[in-house]
Image (cartoon, helix red, strand yellow):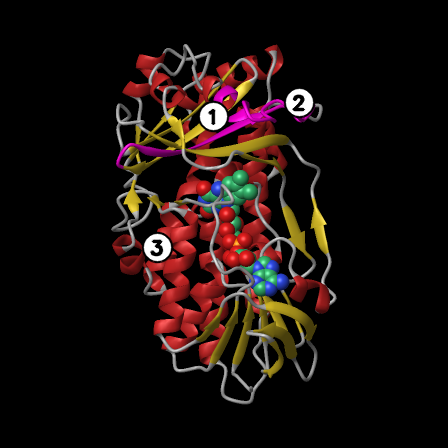
């Protein structure tokens, strides 16, 4: 029961890291709580820079073989824009990363299962239905867990926390999570029968008191998200919630949304409040965190998967370079992650302020933004950071002066 690495959480980050490290010849124990990956309505769009990370990790072909679907164009609709003009200025999505045609969509449960199977095939000891009882970090890390009717204790020089937002490894390592104030409600639904929608085109838009994002998954299936004001806690609650949610997509400014509104719900409708967060540090003696466990970006940008894949690459590179018996040095990972998350948090704040605030002042701000960014594309560089990665744009984009240029003076909270 002694391994090179114990990974708690067999979702995206944990399974990807297990696969990469097992392929590198390390003995890996991967512990996943669930026996079936359920649709929690999250994480099905990988940004172009995240796709590059999957390639660097040697996982891209596996994801495509499992049904990965590329999107190649983007339209931003808005109540202040003519829909035909919005479509005429559709953005090609193959421009943001070399040899990447655009974002990659793959259903989250399929994505997790594919990576978990890849880890097991690469030689990791990959267990499902595990109940973790205790985690020790520090100089003699161990994980005590219940599996197959018995309690076990496994030891390794390092325990990885990859179990998402409620990370037990983070707590055991004494690392604190700092969460920002929520900005808006955000809910997602999988919708079937949206055959009339161009399957390679994603879209976003805001009208009245609702904003939407739509990502075709191929074959007439779409993952759609909607955002609305924090005060309307129960807006889409109850058994009629999914029907009301789909109805909210009918917008004069986004005529193709009628196809979404006429579709059939194919998942539960889950609502989350959107915010960003950060752990003090993504590592401590005997422990390292990847993915949401280390803090997350506001899902308005849809970057949690790309962030997680970057984490996995950084951590796996460090582990592969660390001589046997030596303690890995995660300082470069911590520094790069902190700056990456700082930039992405600001990009998310800009996007949420523009798209997820409602009423006349917010409408006027969006009108001004769309008019001015057509003349001065630097106003939209937060979007380039989303697609191409936060390091792909100049650092000034994340300074208060630039933010004020894009969204105006700081707004009252939504
Ligand atoms: C509404 C919403 C929409 C989103 N949309 C997108 C998107 O389109 N694109 C994008 O990139 N990101 C998106 N995200 C974020 C993305 O889903 C996450 O950032 C990503 O899944 C994080 O991966 P992870 O491996 O850290 O955690 P998870 O995917 O949450 O995996 C954690 C795993 O750990 C397991 N686990 C938990 N506790 C334990 C335990 N005690 N013991 C063992 N196992 C445990 C869980 O069962 C799970 O399998 C969205 C998030 C939300 C909330």
Residue at (31%, 27%) from the top-left corner?
Answer: 194
Among numbered discs 2 and 3, the one appearing first in the sequence: 3
Pick the residue in front: 394 or 365.
365
Q: Residue furthest front?
A: 149
Residue 16 spot, x, y in % from top left: 43, 64
Confirm whether residue 397 shows in the render.
no
* Residue 274, quarter of the rendered image: top right
Callout 2 touching callout 1 (CB < 8 Å): no
Q: Which residue is mark 2?
A: 232
Which residue has dot 3 on it?
52
Instruction: Determine crowd level at label 3: few under 14, some 14-19, many 20+ residues with C-alpha closer than 10 A.
Output: many
Residue 96, percent across and down?
A: 33, 43
Instruction: Inspect this view and state whether residue 94 appears.
Output: yes
Residue 378: image tag: none
Q: Earlier in the sequence, mark 2 or mark 1?
A: 1
Q: Position of residue 98 (x, y in %)?
A: 28, 50
Q: Secondary structure at mark 1?
A: strand
Which of pointers 2 and 1 indicates the residue nearer the eye? 2
- The stretch of residues the image draws in magenta is 219-244
Disc on the earlier residue, 1 or 3: 3
x, y percent for residue 197: 28, 25
Q: Residues within 10 Å of mark 2 (few under 14, many from 20)?
A: few
Q: Which residue is pictured at 46% across the width and 58% down the height?
A: 12
Q: Quadrant of the N terminus?
A: bottom right
Q: Is residue 185 above or below residue 374?
A: below
Asked whether, in this view, residue 313 is left or right of residue 406, the answer is left
Residue at the bottom extreme, as displayed: 325
Q: Is residue 324 above or below residue 47?
A: below
For label 1, the residue is: 212
């Amino acid at each position: 029961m002694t391994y090179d690495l114990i990974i708690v959480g067999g979702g995206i980050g944990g399974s990807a890291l297990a696969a990469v490290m097992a392929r590198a010849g390390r003995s890996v124990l991967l512990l996943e709580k669930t026996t079936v990956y359920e649709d929690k309505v999250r994480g099905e769009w990988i940004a172009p820079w995240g796709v590059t990370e999957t390639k660097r990790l040697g996982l891209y072909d596996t994801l495509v073989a499992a049904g990965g679907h590329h999107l190649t164009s983007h339209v931003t609709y808005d109540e202040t824009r003519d829909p035909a003009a919005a479509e005429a200025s559709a953005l090609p999505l193959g421009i943001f990363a070399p040899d990447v045609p655009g974002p990659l969509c793959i259903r989250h449960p399929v994505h997790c299962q594919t990576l978990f199977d890849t880890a097991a095939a690469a030689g990791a000891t990959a267990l499902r239905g595990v109940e973790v009882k205790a985690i020790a970090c520090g100089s003699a890390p161990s994980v005590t867990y219940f599996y197959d009717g018995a309690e076990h204790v496994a030891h390794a020089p390092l325990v990885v926390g990859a179990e998402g937002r409620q990370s037990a490894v983070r707590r055991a390592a004494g690392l604190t999570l700092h969460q920002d104030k929520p900005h808006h409600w955000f809910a997602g639904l999988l919708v079937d029968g949206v055959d009339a929608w161009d399957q390679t085109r994603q879209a976003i838009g805001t009208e009245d008191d609702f904003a939407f994002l739509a990502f075709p998954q191929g074959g007439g299936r779409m993952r759609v998200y909607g955002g609305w004001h924090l005060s309307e806690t129960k807006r889409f609650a109850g058994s009629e919630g999914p029907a009301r949610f789909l109805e909210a997509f009918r917008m004069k400014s986004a005529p193709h949304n009628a196809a979404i509104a006429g579709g059939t719900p194919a998942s539960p409708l889950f609502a989350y409040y959107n915010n960003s967060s950060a752990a003090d540090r993504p590592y401590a003696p005997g422990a390292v965190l990847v993915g949401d466990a280390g803090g997350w970006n506001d899902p308005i940008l849809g970057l949690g998967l790309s962030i997680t894949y970057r984490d996995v690459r950084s951590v796996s590179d460090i582990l592969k370079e660390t001589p046997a018996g030596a303690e890995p040095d995660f300082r470069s990972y911590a520094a790069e992650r902190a700056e990456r998350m700082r930039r992405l948090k600001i990009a998310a704040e800009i996007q949420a302020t523009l798209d997820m605030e409602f009423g006349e002042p917010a409408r006027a701000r969006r009108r001004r933004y769309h008019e001015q960014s057509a003349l001065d594309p630097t106003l939209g560089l937060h979007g380039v950071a989303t697609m191409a990665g936060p390091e792909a744009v100049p650092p000034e984009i994340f300074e208060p002066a630039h933010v004020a240029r894009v969204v105006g003076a700081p707004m009252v909270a939504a």
